[in-house]
């Protein structure tokens, strides 16, 4: 069995538990092992690098050393992914940061571990044919806006995954799950989560533009792959309907929740909202009715 080192990060143990449990459920269905990094610690995202870049790389590097005993490391949170990815790049070329780790009893060997996101790991599984015969409850007729945000594929020299302007990996995963990915303009636009305390209006305008673009594209749901983006897109909607010209509310789900639904994973593990499940079942029924008429 293929096994990854799994780095849940802080958010997946608190505000994004459903992302954690649905990710574990999906990889279990695919026959891929996830071994949690022992004694993992906060990766330092997203503020540590603003205080001390070397220390930030060392904090994330500690987790890479621990993960290297298991295998390549998978990080669901896009912010954690980028923090670990940046640290891996810096550790490859900066012996000073490696020495900092060594002083604390940790030795990083260049090339010993690769950092990938859960989207990339799932897409790799798709390309290997690991979804074949396992999508038993396809998301028929469900229109999905795949939202990558600003950290999964950028900066390209660090992320080294998918197309920086028009990524398609999550869209292909949604297709494999039986859904219909929509073409839309804001799949890699920043949601402004990190700036909500600095410039509220700017952040809310960014969120409004993203959600309005998804609605205009005809999406039923937006699929996210970052707990910070997810929270930002969910929490602001009621207020934005009143103050910021949001066309209509739209459900925000983790891409892993949709994959898990199609793979017939336990609904309790998926943590998917009842209203979203009713929408999924409604779209399935509509697809079946069209098929019967045809």
Image (cartoon, helix red, strand yellow):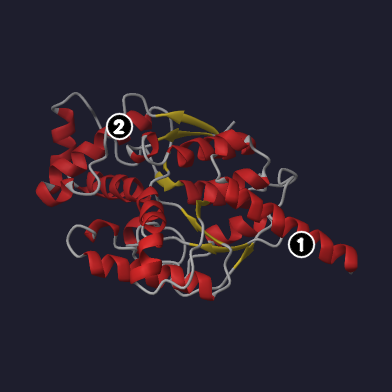
> Residue 251 in the image: x percent, y percent?
51, 57
Q: Is residue 119 visible?
A: yes
Front position in the image: 62 or 227: 227
In the depicted structure, whether residue 212 falls above or below residue 75: below
Task: Work out whether mark 2 precedes mark 1 in sequence or the reverse, and give the earlier one.
Answer: 2
> Residue 70 in the image: x percent, y percent?
42, 29
Front position in the image: 169 or 21: 21
The residue most toward the front is: 242
Quarter of the image with the C terminus in it: bottom right
Image point (44%, 37%), residue name: 17
Q: Is residue 189 visible?
A: no
Residue 12 placement, left or right of 109? right
Picture quadrant of residue 154? bottom left
Residue 52 placement, left or right of 10? left
- Decide: few, some or many residues near mark 2? Use Cα within 10 Å; few <14, some 14-19, many ≥20: some
> Residue 65 in the image: x percent, y percent?
30, 32
Q: Which residue is mark 1?
A: 286
Q: CA distance from mark 2 to mark 1?
A: 50 Å
Q: Which residue is mark 2?
A: 65
Picture quadrant of residue 63? top left
Element at label 2 = helix
Q: Are marks 2 and 1 in contact (CB under 8 Å)?
A: no
> Residue 211 in the image: x percent, y percent?
44, 68
Residue 108 placement, left or right of 29? left
- Decide: few, some or many residues near mark 1? Use Cα within 10 Å; few <14, some 14-19, many ≥20: some
Image point (19%, 23%), residue name: 105
In the depicted structure, whether residue 53 falls above or below residue 239: above
* Res. 132 mark: none
């Amino acid at each position: 069995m293929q096994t990854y080192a799994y780095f849940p990060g802080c958010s997946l143990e608190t505000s994004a538990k459903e992302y954690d449990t649905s990710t574990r459920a999906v990889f279990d269905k695919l026959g891929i092992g996830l071994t949690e990094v022992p004694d993992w610690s906060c990766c330092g995202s997203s503020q540590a690098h603003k205080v001390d870049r070397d220390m930030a790389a060392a904090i994330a590097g500690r987790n890479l050393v621990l993960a290297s005993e298991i295998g390549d490391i998978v990080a669901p949170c896009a912010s954690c992914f980028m923090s670990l990815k940046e640290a891996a790049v810096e550790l490859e070329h900066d012996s000073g940061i490696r020495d900092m780790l060594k002083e604390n009893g940790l030795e990083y060997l260049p090339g010993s571990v690769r950092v990938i996101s859960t989207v990339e790991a799932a897409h790799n599984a798709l390309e290997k044919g690991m979804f074949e015969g396992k999508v038993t409850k396809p998301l028929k007729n469900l229109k999905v806006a795949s939202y990558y945000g600003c950290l999964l594929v950028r900066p390209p020299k660090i992320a080294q995954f998918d197309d920086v302007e028009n990524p398609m990996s999550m869209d292909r995963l949604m297709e494999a799950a039986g859904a219909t990915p929509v073409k839309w303009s804001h799949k890699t636009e920043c949601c402004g989560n990190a700036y909500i305390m600095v410039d509220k209006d700017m952040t809310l305008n960014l969120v409004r533009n993203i959600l309005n673009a998804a609605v205009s594209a005809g999406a039923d749901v937006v699929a996210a792959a970052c707990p910070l983006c997810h929270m930002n897109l969910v929490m602001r909607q009621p207020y934005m309907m009143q103050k910021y010209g949001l066309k209509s509310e739209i459900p925000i789900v983790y891409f892993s929740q949709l994959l898990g639904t199609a793979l017939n994973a336990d609904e309790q593990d998926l943590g998917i909202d009842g209203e979203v499940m009713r929408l999924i079942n409604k779209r399935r029924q509509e697809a079946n009715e069209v098929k019967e008429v045809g």
